Amino acid sequence: MADSTRPVEESLGGFSLGSRSTHSRVSLIRFLPMLGIGLMMALGLDVLPASAQAPASAQTAEAALPEEAPVQMVQLLGPNQATPPATLTLHDALELAGKNDPVYLSAVVEAKIAHEDAVQAHGGILPTITATTQYLGTQGNGITPNGRYVTQDGVHVYRAWGVLHENISGSSLMITAYRRSMAAEAISKAKIEIARRGLAVTVTKNFYGLVVAQHKYATAQEALEQAKHFLAITQDSERAGQTAHSDVLKGQIQYELQAQAFDEAGLSLEEARLNLAVLLFPTLNENFSVVDDMGSALALPPFTEVQAMAERANPNLRIAAETVRQSDLDAFAAKAAFFPSLDIEADYGIEANAFALHSVSAAFPEKGPLPNLGYFVTANLSVPVWDWGGLRSKLHQAKYRQAQVRAELSQAQRELLNNLYSYYNEALVSRASVDRARRTADLAAESLRLINLRYQAGTSTALEVVDAATSLTQARNSYDDAEVRYRTAVTNLQTLTGSF
């Protein structure tokens, strides 16, 4: 009897059943649940309580969480890496970019060329003074003193003249060429301003893109630390039998996702730094840092003030207006070509048989030495009579061009108003989104803090903690993006109005 009951006692984990006759019902009741548990375990079902599973699952979670080193980005090496990094403000970045941007430098060169054109046009309306010295040697004939060329008064003729020349026409009287060159210079200066403002938009985007990349890197690092802390909490709770293994898995998944997001944030930071370095330095240099002034947002003036600034300082409108001015001058010059023109030339100097102030004339040697220094004036009046319609065709071309540029001026004015309303409204909305995003980020941080406390108290789920952490990261990134959006919107508005 003892031998027959020993296997049963051992199979029941040490419970003593006593005699089979008196304890058969109790034995059956205790044996059946244990048999069911054994069958379920054989089928692979998780039926043990958390307290019984805690040691194995905790070891599994710890084994699944290796100590990973953060990804090390390959950075640019150069001779400046040993020196302390330069700290740049947005103003510094704009100045550095202006020294290296080819589009802006090209506009500056074009303006300098236009200025020289204006200087040349100004000189063209004034009389020109030239000096000329000539020697005319004529073959003699042995008989006459002037030789074989009757146009000369001697075998040897010397000329030393100072020549003053002036052209008088309708265009020169109205200084049309000079006024047109001044309009071209104004257009080139307006193009410099367009290039400068466009460069300011690009630099501002990249400058604050780097600042935001730094913010997002710090946010990702903090989110990674929070995910690691939450995973440790779930592991401790599982060991204590307070949470299920699914919470540990949720924490593990969250940690892996945040680790990947942290690596991506580091990559975005390096790319933002390289993009800004390309704009700022003649040789690629990453040895710099930027001043984080995201908290000091620019104030937005009233729309009436912005509109007045756009009317005064919009370069596109100025280009259109100066182009109209050029077309008007071209039309006037085409009309002036129908009127007569007068060329006046005054010469002062000598034209004699000797290079001297007094000499004997070869034609009249008996007169003795005569004075050579003197002047003569030539006036030439030209009247257009017939040119087969060439002048009239040029006038028609000038009028066609005049009508076209006036239409372009009207279009530029309409586009200015359209862009002004659009950019200003964009700035208003983006400024409001900055305030909302800041409040949302504060609320998300407070929500995560409270949910963490609730989870530790056992009244919240792991899914709520993960969702709150994700919401905080998204809210902070959205706040940084809203800051950049507002500053970019203000810079775009300043392309129409200038700085304010």
Image: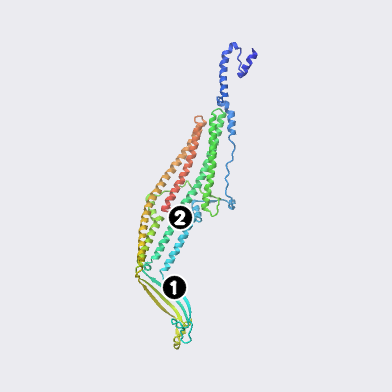
Horizontal and vertical percent position of residue 55: 59, 28
Most extreme residue toward the right, as rendered? 3
Viewer-nearest residue: 137 or 122: 137
Query: Who is closer to the viewer here, 77 or 456?
Result: 77
Q: Eyeballing the image, is 216 above or below 106?
A: above
In this view, the residue in front, 51 or 84, is: 51
**Residue 98: x %, y % from top left:** 49, 55
Identify which residue is drawn at 60% across, 33% down.
Answer: 63
The residue positioned farthest toward the bottom in the image shown: 366
Residue for badge 1: 129
Using the rendered image of the protein, determine whether residue 346 is visible from the camera's viewpoint. yes
Give the SS element for disc 1.
strand
Mark 2–mark 1 Cα distance, whole angstroms, equals: 41 Å
Residue ID at (46%, 51%): 201
The percent coordinates of residue 462 (x first, y second) are: 51, 32
Q: Residues within 10 Å of mark 2 (few under 14, many from 20)?
A: many
> Which amino acid does the dot numbered 2 rest on?
Ala
Q: Is residue 456 left or right of residue 383?
A: right
Residue drawn at x 46%, y 78% is 160
What residue type is disc 1 on? Ile
Residue annotated with mark 2: 195
> N-terminal of the two: label 2 or label 1?
1
